Image (tube, rainbow, N blue to C red):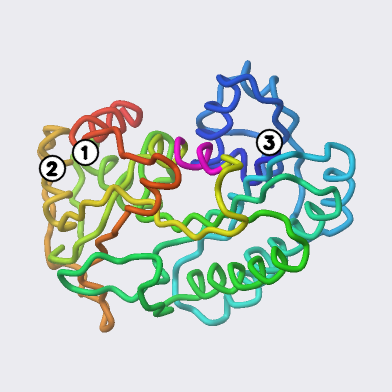
């Protein structure tokens, strides 16, 4: 099995679970260290450092290992809206993805699993988002992910390599980068530092990383259609304000959360709430963790 982005947040959790299942794993990542995997786990895999946009580099690895399954998690996750970042996102999220798929097809891998984003949907108040819901691109990141999906679908049809696209909502858990909202807030609360945010009335669906991992592994099921797009989410949305208060209380922090210190975006998305029926049917997917319990686990990791 090949995991790209194997040293990253979701990738490391996936590798740990695959090792438990006895899988032989190759990882490709820019980095050779993981915040999550321990030295024994790192020694149990082959990790190659390099750029996925380098077609020759990818060719050598794919030709050598001929993976049955490819889990493509590596991505540039830059979410600012500066159009000057367009080139790097095209290179790392589109060109790299097509390079990897074409090399995968050349050795007739059994399945290509691509982690996309649920950010690409149009947010709708009081309405669950399904895989057929309208697309509304609001960032270069979601534009690059959606473009990669389109290319992959076309290439999958041409090569007959089965493709699974998983559109993931807001994921969190142990080891996530502190540039993300949940760990950023946890660290501020643990340090008793003031945390500034919007009024937090917007609603988001947060899914625990282990639930994501179980779904990714389930997507290797050969009974699935050759092409599927599935939403991965908890199925429950929460106001960012309420999530912030919950984390603050679980930490027992003396810090202040300054609601309204940061203005809303002019095109703010007010609610992302997802229908996960298709994932439930096809992957036997069911979120197994309560928000309170996994937030406690996540907080413990950062202490």
What residue do we see at 21% from left, 51% from top? 236
Q: Is residue 27 magenta?
A: no
Residue 168 in the image: above or below residue 261 = above
> SS at mark 3?
loop
* Label 3 environment density (alpha carbons within 10 Å; few <14, some 14–19, many ≥20): some
Q: How many marks?
A: 3
Q: Quadrant of residue 201?
A: bottom left
Task: Residue 46 in the image: state x and y as whole percent.
Answer: 75, 30
Mark 3 sits on what residue?
Answer: 32
What residue do we see at 38% from left, 41% from top? 285
The C terminus lies in which quarter of the figure?
Answer: top left
> SS at mark 2?
helix
Residue 168 in the image: above or below residue 35 = below
**Residue that sits furthest to the top in the current view:** 40
Q: Quadrant of residue 197?
A: bottom left
Mark 1 sits on what residue?
Answer: 291
Task: Residue 175 in the image: state x and y as whole percent.
Answer: 43, 36
Q: Nearer the viewer, mark 2 or mark 3?
A: 2
Query: In terms of sequence position, does the residue under pointer 2 or pointer 1 come before the other?
Result: 2
What residue do we see at 68% from left, 45% from top? 70
Residue 200 in the image: above or below residue 84 = above
- Which sits in the foreground, 258 or 265? 265
Q: Are marks 2 and 1 in contact (CB under 8 Å)?
A: yes
Relative placement, left or right, of 81 versus 233 is: right
Residue range corresponding to the magenta coloring: 214-219
> SS at mark 1?
helix
Q: Nearer the viewer, mark 3 or mark 1?
A: 1
Distance Cα–Cα, label 3 vs label 1: 32 Å
- Which sits in the foreground, 226 or 112? 226
The N terminus lies in which quarter of the figure?
Answer: top right
Mark 2 sits on what residue?
Answer: 246
């Amino acid at each position: 099995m090949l995991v790209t982005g194997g040293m990253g947040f979701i990738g490391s959790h996936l590798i740990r679970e695959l090792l438990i299942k006895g899988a032989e794993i190759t990882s490709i990542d820019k980095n050779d260290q993981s915040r999550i995997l321990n030295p024994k786990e790192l020694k149990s895999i082959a990790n190659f450092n390099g750029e996925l946009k380098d077609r020759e580099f990818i060719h050598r690895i794919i030709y050598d290992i001929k993976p049955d399954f490819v889990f493509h998690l590596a991505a540039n996750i830059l979410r600012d809206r500066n159009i000057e970042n367009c080139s790097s996102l095209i290179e790392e999220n589109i060109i790299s993805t097509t390079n990897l798929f074409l090399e995968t097809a050349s050795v007739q891998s059994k399945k290509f699993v691509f982690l996309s984003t649920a950010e690409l949907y149009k947010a709708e108040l009081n309405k669950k988002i399904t895989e057929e819901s309208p697309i509304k691109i609001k960032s270069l990141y979601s534009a690059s992910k959606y473009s990669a999906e389109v290319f992959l679908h076309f290439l999958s049809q041409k090569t007959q390599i089965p493709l699974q696209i998983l559109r993931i909502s807001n994921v969190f858990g142990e080891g996530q980068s502190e540039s993300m909202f949940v760990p950023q807030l946890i660290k501020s609360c643990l340090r008793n530092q003031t945390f500034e945010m919007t009024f937090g009335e917007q609603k988001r669906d947060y899914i625990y990383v282990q639930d994501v991992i179980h779904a990714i592994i389930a997507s290797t099921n050969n009974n699935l259609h050759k092409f599927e797009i599935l939403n991965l989410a908890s199925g429950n949305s929460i106001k960012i304000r309420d999530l912030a208060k919950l984390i603050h209380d679980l930490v027992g922090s003396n810090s202040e959360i300054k609601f309204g210190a940061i203005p809303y975006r002019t095109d703010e998305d007010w609610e992302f709430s997802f229908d996960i029926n298709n994932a439930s049917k096809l992957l036997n997917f069911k979120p197994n963790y309560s928000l309170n319990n996994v937030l406690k686990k996540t907080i413990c990791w950062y202490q």
